Image (cartoon, rainbow, N blue to C red):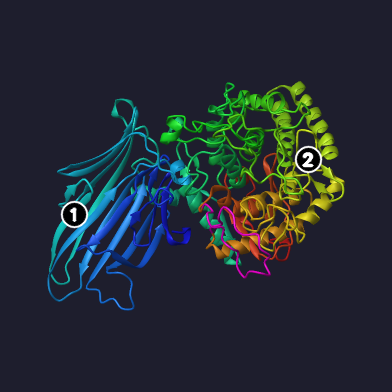
Amino acid sequence: MGATDTIRILDGNTFVVSEDTGDIEATPSEPTGLFSLDTRFLSKWVLTVNGERLNALSYDDLQYYEARFFLVPGMATHYIDAKLSIIRERAVGGSFRETLTILNHDEKPVDLEIRMDAGSDFADLFEVKDEVLNKKGESYAEAEPDRLRLGYRRGNFRRETVVTSSGRARYDRDGFAYTVHLEPNEQWNTAIEVQTHAVGPGGRDLRMGLRAHGTERLALQHDLEEWIAKAPRVNSEHGRVSHTYRRSLIDLAALRFSPISLGGQALPAAGLPWFMTMFGRDSILTSLQVLPFAPDLSKTTLRILGALQGTRFDDFRDEDPGRILHEMRYGETAAFEEQPHSPYYGSVDATPLFVVLLDEYEKWTGDVALVKELERECRAALKWVDDYADLAGNGYIWYERRNSDTGLENQCWKDSWDSISYRDGTLPPFPRATCEVQGYAYDAKMRAARLAREFWGDPAYADKLEREAAELRRRFNRDWWVADGEYYALGLDPTGRQMDVLSSNIGHLLWSGIVDDERAAKIAEHLVGPRLFSGWGVRTLAEGEVRYNPIGYHNGTIWPFDNSFIAWGLRRYGFAEEAATIANGILDAATYFDGRLPEAFGGYPRELTKFPVEYPTACSPQAWSTGTPLLLIRTMLGLEPHEGHLAVDPRLPIGMGRIEVLDIPGRWGRVDAFARGRLDLHNLAQT
């Protein structure tokens, strides 16, 4: 079953993926089912009427957390003479609720046997992803007079699914059933509740008290309305921008969840279905993208990542003192250390990006208290950059996999096994260093210098950081420049040899500010040139490289988040037209995905396809793709925070027509004239 065949509803890291009938028939290799905390709590949920499966007429995607299915008995044929209508209404919000309604359209009464087959394999999401179900514990099913209890236990690890119904149901170990008599034009309904339990010591649910656990539909609706109302209003003469912006706000709301480690605070999960948990890199970059529109996500992200910052040397988890985590998981394989994600620290970019986010957050909000609160964590992160990340002893950030069994080979954002290569297509030895991470380190030191000088009362430390940043910039522009191509290498190997492919990573260098001014124009030319720019966006790897593949995960696809930071970097160096070209391509692509940009899509030339080609296993919604339109809007409007006011530079030639931003929170709110005004980008004038 492909992604386009499935119906998805979610609330944080609790989500349901089903067929278009609402049925669930999961296999070890398909991410269908009811999931929470990286565990599948329902793998079978199949409705029959008089032993007959149902045919889908249509479904309504009502909100991110609820859907409605309209069904009739019988399989799809050329003709169905239906005398019954079946409506399934479902919602998720910590628990899972489904209401069944059956209407009799016949002129005579009917007797019905309605059955729901229910079961759970309690698969860990990693088992589903790896297509191997290898359970080492004990499963059980208990039919009680008023409920069905499905469970799994392995030592102290215990998960349970409890099903109850408002109707008079007969429960057995494989599901439950109803006997119903309906007169003509009569209807019957019942409400089914599915509770998921992650049972800890003493039988207490580990999630008790968290925001999403047990949240009811009306509370979710109110929360969504409040979330949207708090964000600035964006209007556009071309409705695609407004529609995509609203879709992004809704998806951000859907992806919010509260990690067990710090209950009650919400940050965005990375993406459905595989990454519905906390990721250091993803949470930081998403928070940066949406900071002017939803600053609270940044505050929570910084606090949680700071609280879980590495404190020791642990090769199994790739942990070092000061290192920011890569990924946190709550499933069985993490609990029993069959994989290291409890948490796992195998990322080299999250740590400098943590410092970048803290500085950017203060610039937009003026929250000096958080800057002071996280001073120790910020200093520890910078110490990691200098003392533990420089594996080759030459002043750059490097990575290698210390956990050879379950750790990541590549620990930059392009973390698939074959994403880092030389021009001839061969893969380099370890350790490896990639270019964009050096830019993040430069940016982190420059930003931390400001924090140290203005808020930590340590000008000597600020001077030291600025000297180190300047030296890093000088060495980087010497060692990473590919002379025969006039761009920066994707990476270096331990001998200093360049990984001399042309990649999208060079755009992140513009965003960080590490690029020498005299070289920036050539980088901009490459980014919108035919090898990298497809017409829809910038490819991860340039056409013509040995490993280029328009549907290769990191070797030729287009990642919306990547493009948003590239456009931001181009704008930083004054390349407004190039930034506009990329923004137009990505926002055009968004219209073909109904405003919801996926994790990635194909890098085929635009003249070859009238629409962007879907990547088969892309996450959707995905946090940093959801944040992309917000960063592009910021880039298009030239919005930058300064001392107590907002700097606006509307001179961006982009064919979006008039864009209006109203009700601006935080520091934006101090700019009353702008908050009430509008930018006319078509005529390049502020009115």
Measuring 51% from the left and 53% from the top, which residue is drawn there? 620
Give the mark nearest the N terminus, 1 or 2.
1
Find out whether residue 600 is within the magenta segment: yes
Q: Is residue 585 above or below residue 76?
A: above
Q: How many numbered discs sit on the rendered protein?
A: 2
Q: Start and end of the magenta stretch?
A: 596-619
Q: Residues within 10 Å of mark 1 (few under 14, many from 20)?
A: some
Given the image, on which type of amino acid does mark 1 rest?
Ala
Report the mark closest to the observer, 1 or 2.
Answer: 1
Q: Is residue 111 above or below residue 484?
A: below
What residue sits right under mark 1 in the picture? 177
Q: Nearer the viewer, residue 6 or 226?
A: 6
Which labelled disc corresponds to residue 279? none
Q: Is residue 240 left or right of residue 652?
A: left
Find out whether residue 116 is within the magenta segment: no
Can you give x and y, in whole percent of width and height, for residue 540 in the image?
68, 52
Magenta: main secondary structure:
loop
Q: CA distance from mark 1 to mark 2?
A: 65 Å
Q: Are marks 1 and 2 in contact (CB under 8 Å)?
A: no
Can you give x and y, in whole percent of width and height, for residue 645 in the image?
68, 43
Quarter-wise, where is residue 258 in the image?
top left
Q: Residues within 10 Å of mark 2 (few under 14, many from 20)?
A: many
Residue 423 seen from this side: yes
Q: Is residue 46 above or below residue 335?
A: below
What residue sits right under mark 2 in the picture? 514
Q: Quadrant of the N terminus?
A: bottom left
Q: Is residue 218 left or right of residue 114?
A: right
Q: Nearer the viewer, residue 404 or 245?
A: 404
Q: Quadrant of the C terminus?
A: bottom right
